[in-house]
Amino acid sequence: MRHTELVERNWRLSASWINQMSKTPPKFVLCVRNNDCPDLEVRKLYQALPDKHAERDGFLRIVDESGEDYLYPQSYFAAVRLARKAHEAMAACR
């Protein structure tokens, strides 16, 4: 693949991801294991960003304390359903 094709493809994926983000309410997950990954704290809630490509490959896009998002194995997390008030409070922190 030529460089220009790669840049165009990445731009399309980014635009798709941004569009998807604006339509999707924030999702939160609980870290249940980290396999000695120092970036994650077990028993801590993290925001998971929608990323169909990553999920298809068994990963979640997680926002860490720095505010940056990274891919981690889905098996490190459990989905949680927060009460409306808690969900609003967590969403306001982003």
Image (tube, rainbow, N blue to C red):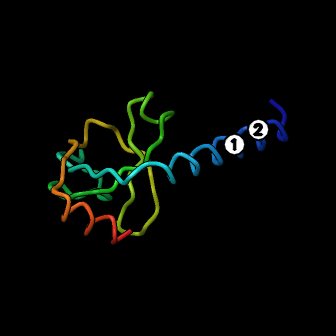
Cα distance between the residues tagged 1 and 2: 6 Å
Badge 2 local density, few (<14 within 10 Å), some, or many (20+)? few
In the picture, measured across the screen, residue 44 lies left or right of residue 66, that is left
Q: Is residue 44 above or below residue 9?
A: below
**Which part of the image, by quadrant, shows the N terminus?**
top right
Amino acid at dot 1? Asn
Contact flag, marks 1 and 2 (Cβ < 8 Å)? yes
- Crowd band around label 1 with a 10 angstrom C-alpha radius: few (<14), some (14–19), many (20+): few
Residue at the spot 39% in from the left edge and 68% down from the top edge: 94
- Name the image quarter holding residue 58: top left
Tell me if 4 is positioned left or right of 38 in this view: right
Q: Secondary structure at mark 1?
A: helix
Please give the name of the residue rendered at 53% of the width and 45% of the height, measured from the top-left corner. Answer: 20
Q: Is residue 17 left or right of residue 89?
A: right
The residue under the point 25% across, 49% down is: 29
In percent of width and height, residue 92 lies at 34, 70
- Say what amino acid the circle numbered 2 marks: Leu
Which residue in the structure is indicated by mark 2? 6
Q: Nearer the viewer, residue 62 or 28?
A: 28
Residue drawn at x 18%, y 54% is: 82
Residue 38, percent from left and from top? 29, 58
Instruction: Count numbered badges in the picture.
Output: 2
User: Where is mark 1, residue-wise?
Assistant: 10
Q: Which mark is residue 60?
A: none
2 shown above or below 33: above
Front one among 43 and 80: 80
Instruction: Give the secondary structure at mark 2.
Output: helix
Q: Nearer the viewer, residue 84 or 51?
A: 84
